[in-house]
Image (spheres, grey):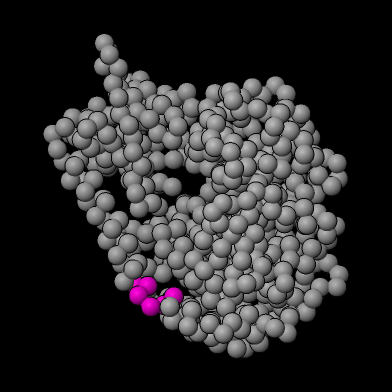
Amino acid sequence: MNRKTTSMPWRLLGAGLLLASSCLAKADSLSDKLDGFMAEMEQSPYAPPSYSLAVASGDRLLYSRLHGNKVAGGDVPLDMDTRLYIASVSKSFMGLLAAKLDAEGVLSLDATLADEWPELGLPDPIDPATITMRMLLSHNFGFENDPLVIRTAYIGGTAIADFEEILEQHSVPIESGFSYDNLGYLIYAAVLERKTGRSWKDWLKNDIHRPLGLESASNIPSEIPVADIGLGNHFNPLSKTGWSVATAKQDDLMHPAGGHFISTHDAVRWLQANLNKAVFDPAVYNTAQTAYAERTPAKKYADMTCDGYGLGWQTCDYAGHRVFYHGGTYNGMMIFMVFLPDDNLVVSSINGARAYGWTFGWNALQQAVDYALGLEAADDNASRRLEGRVESQAGYAHFRMRIREDALRKATSLEAAALRSDLIGTYKSPAYGDATICDAGGRLTLRVGHFSAEVLASTEGRAYLLERAYGEPSKLDVSRGNADDALSFGWEGGTFNHVSGDGCLGGEDVSR
C-alpha cells in the first residue's frame, strides 16, 4: 500500500523563502511520472519492505510516497510522522551545530586537540597540536581508531568519559587526506562536553532541533513511543518473505556521527532549513557548507560526483547542478538526503533495507531529481535504471548465498569442527571488554555488548562472522599461545583472549 501527498502547502522556517522555482516541473507532472517509476521499482522482490520518498521546493511539498508498514508484517502503515533512523545524516546536524558554536565563540573550529584536550596523549607520530576541530569534522586528520568507532556504533556502554583511554591505547596513524569515518565527530563531541559540561544531545536538542521546529527529531530512542518508530529490515533468503525485521537502535548506541530518529516531515524541514539558511545567521550555514577536505579522486555515487566535504555535507555535482549530499546506513536502513541550492530543491529518500536499499534508494532519489528539474534525459534515465534491475539484484542474492554455502562447506571439515569446539567460551579484550562465543540454537554466536553475529569455524586457523547486512563475511584471525595453548582472535582492531570455556550463555544473532 502506498500513501502519497503532492503539492501541499508547507510551513517552513525563516522569512522570505523562495517559492517553487519556475524551472521545476509542475507537481502534477512530477507526481504522475515519479509514481509510475516507483510502482515499477516496487515490483522487484528485492525492493525494501518500506520506504519514504519526499520532494520539496520553496514552501511546498511537491511529492511524497510512503510504502509499507512501520514494522514489516504489521498493519500500521508508514506515514509522514513515523520516526525513522537516519544514521550518518546525523553528521549534518553536528556540522551545523559546530558552525553555530564557532560563530558564538563557544568552541572555535580552529582550536586544536592540544588546545582543548591537553591531557590527551596520542601515539606518535599523531600530533594533537596539528589537528583542529574543523579537520575532525571534515574527516581530514590522519589517524583512525576502530575500537572506539565500533564500540559506540554497535557494542554500546561506552561513555565519553571512556574515550581518552581508548584514544590513547588504540589510535593508529593513517595517510593524511580525506578518510571518511565516525571518529572525528566522536572526538568533537567529547571536546564539546569537556569544555561546556553539556552533552552533544543536549546541545542539539536546544540549539538545533527546537529553533528549527524539528519536533520529531530525537537522539534518545527510549523517549520515543514505540508505536511511532518505523523499523528497518535485513534481507534474509532463508525467510519466507525474504526479509527479517531489524531491531531499533538503543540509547547507548546513539552517537554524534549516527544518532538521530526523525520523521519524513521533519527531514524535509531540515533540508529546507539548510537550503534557505533559515533562523540562524546565513554565515553559519555558509561555514557548514564550505568544503574543507578534497576528495581525490572524486567519489562517484551512481550519476552524481562528490569532490569535497564540509561540516556534515558532501559537495557534489549532478548533471551540472550543484548538490549538497549526505547519506547513511545502519541495521536495516539506507538513507540519502540532498538539497540543490541553485534549484530550490530538496529530496529525502529513507529506505527500510540495507541490502538492496542502496540501489533502490539512489535510483528513487536520482529519478526524483531528474523529473523535478525536468531534465531532458529523465525518461531515458528511468528506463536505464529499471532495465535489468531484478536480474542484477537476484545475482547479488545468489552471490550472498554462495558465500554462505562456501563458508558452511568449509565448516564441515574435521579441522573446522575442532576449532569450533575450542572457540566456545568467554573472552576479554583490552579494546572491547568482555565477549562470549556460544552455541546458540545450533549456531556459534559471538556476542560483544549489543553486537552479535554467527561464527563459522573454517580451515587454516580462521573463522568468519556472517553478518546479515554484508555480502562479505568478516574474518577472525585465530591464534594460539605457547605453553598453555591459549586461544585468541583478532577482530576490528582488537584482540580477544580466551579466558574460560565456562559461563557461556547463548543469544540471538542480531548482527549489524
Give coordinates of residue 239: x percent, y percent. 30, 60
Q: Residue at x 69, y 64 (%)?
A: 271
What residue is rendered at 30% in x and 56% in y? 400
Q: Quadrant of residue 109?
A: top right
Q: Where in the figure is residue 355, as x and y percent of width and height?
A: 41, 59
Q: Quadrant of residue 388?
A: bottom left
**Principal SS element in the magenta part?**
helix
Residue plotted at (70% across, 83% down): 23
- Using residue 268 as the reference point, say whether residue 211 is left or right of it: right
Please, which residue is most extreme toward the left here? 414
- Residue at the (31%, 71%) spot, across then down: 391
Q: Is residue 46 visible?
A: yes
Q: Disc count in the image?
A: 0
* Residue 5 image position (x, y, % from top left): 62, 80
Q: Quadrant of residue 227?
A: bottom right
Q: The magenta stretch spans which residues?
A: 385-390
Instruction: Describe residue 383's horizontal placement relative to residue 272 as left or right.
Output: left
Q: Residue furthest front?
A: 297
How far across and down, in percent of the image, does residue 63 sit? 62, 79
Vertical position of residue 420 compared to residue 305: above or below: above
The one nearer the camera, 6 or 271, is 271
User: Is 455 a magenta residue?
Assistant: no
| Residue sitting nearer the eye, 272 or 124 | 124
Q: Is residue 444 visible?
A: no
